[in-house]
Amino acid sequence: MIKLTAFFAGLIFGLGLLLAGMANPAKVLAFLDLAGAWDPSLALVMGGAIAVAIIPLNWARKNKQSLLGAPMQFPMKRELDSRLIGGSLLFGIGWGLAGICPGPALTILLTGHGQIIIFVLAMLAGMYLFNLLERSARPD
């Protein structure tokens, strides 16, 4: 039941990305172009997403288990550190250069566009490199 629920949640999320225009790199780049022909429509998408998420997030914070019985897991660390800031900067730079981030990239991967395939391969290589660096930094 949990895997089926996760599948449908992912499917709805992907459809939402497509409908909102988040999977269109030109639209994302127009949103990020504050000094040029700025397209504010994605700000409305983000605002709507935040408004919709407030109620379930508050519910989740008050409960120890999800509706399917899984334990609630929230980040314990609250302070900013160099890893968080560095990762945010890398994500933002990649988003600004490509006009796409991981969720929408996976959503439109099956279109077969060469640029998206290269983006996803680079993303996977970055994840692999991160895991290698994390493993080498841990004391055994």
Image (cartoon, grey):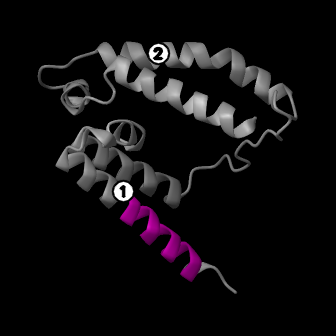
48 shown above or below 64: above
Q: Quadrant of residue 52?
A: top right
Please report the residue visible at 31 percent of the width from the left and 30 percent of the height from the top.
23
Q: Does the magenta stretch include residue 75?
A: no
Say the numbered circle drawn on residue 47. 2
Q: Where is residue 58 in the image (x, y as percent from the top left)?
A: 74, 21
| SS type, badge 1 | helix
Q: How far apart are marks 2 and 1 (CA)?
A: 27 Å
Give residue 50's mark.
Answer: none
Name the residue type under label 1.
Met
Q: Which x, y percent locates residue 20? A: 36, 18
The location of residue 102, given as percent across then percent down, is 40, 44
Q: How crowded is mark 1: few (under 14 residues within 10 Å), some or many (20 or more)?
A: some
Q: In this view, does 121 lie to the left or right of 17?
A: left
Where, quadrant-wise, is the C terminus in this rendering?
bottom right
- Nearest the camera: 85 or 49? 49
In the rendered image, which residue does mark 1 sit on? 123
> Going 73% across and 42% down the picture, which residue do you hit?
74
In the image, which residues are magenta? 124-136
